[in-house]
Image (cartoon, rainbow, N blue to C red):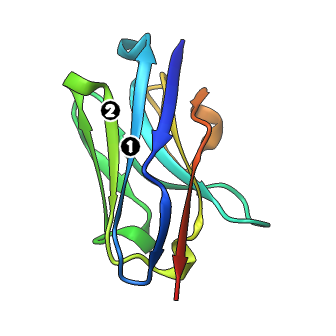
Amino acid sequence: QVQLVESGGGSVQTGGSLRLSCAASGNTYSSNCVGWFRQAPGKEREGVAQIYSRSRTTYYRASVTGRFTISQDNAKNTVYLQMNSLKPEDTAMYYCAASTDPRCFVGSTQLFGHWGQGTQVTVSS
């Protein structure tokens, strides 16, 4: 089992920055990749970014490419999401999730079996 705890959310103005953290504990070696997702009120959960644990290959959805950066610190068992140039449409609850599936991809939430409780990000105009 892998336990995930997100932190770092908050309220910022348009153009501001936040860094989200996802601290993992438990059987972290079983994780193949970690993804960040978000869900705004009335909308479906969507994948934002992911990082493969071993190769550190990353993927971003088009709307955040160039603004968000996902990274990991193995010594701290923590994955980060640095979010710059934030926009009101980035407002959502952000979740991190871990997958043991080698096919893991943030476009398929069902491939992620371990989820954190979420952290709220609010961007005002």
Q: In this view, does 55 lie above or below 63?
A: above
Q: Is residue 36 left or right of residue 85?
A: right
Residue at x 47% of width, y 33% of height:
103
Q: Are marks 2 and 1 in contact (CB under 8 Å)?
A: yes
Q: Residues within 10 Å of mark 2 (few under 14, many from 20)?
A: some
Q: Is residue 115 left or right of residue 76?
A: right
Q: Is residue 40 above or below residue 1?
A: below
Residue 117 sits in quarter: top right
Which mark is on residue 38?
none
In this orientation, which residue lies closer to the viewer: 104 or 19? 19
Find the residue positioned furthest to the front.
Answer: 11
Disc 1 element: strand
Q: Distance from label 2 to label 1 (Cα)? A: 7 Å
Q: What residue type is labelled 2?
A: Thr
Number of numbered discs = 2
Give the percent coordinates (x, y) of residue 40: 67, 65
Q: Name the residue under label 1.
A: 21
Q: Mark 2 points at which residue?
A: 78
Disc 2 element: strand
Q: What residue type is labelled 1?
A: Ser
Residue 66 sits in quarter: bottom left
Residue at x 65% of width, y 36% of height:
110
Q: Residues within 10 Å of mark 1 (few under 14, many from 20)?
A: many
Find the residue positioned furthest to the right.
Answer: 42
Residue 30 in sight from this viewpoint: yes
Give the percent coordinates (x, y) of residue 74: 23, 26
Q: Is residue 102 left or right of residue 90?
A: left
Going from N to C along the chain, the mark reached first, 2 or 1, is 1
In this orientation, which residue lies closer to the viewer: 45 or 123? 123
Give the percent coordinates (x, y) of residue 9: 48, 55
Q: In this view, does 16 lie above or below 48?
A: below
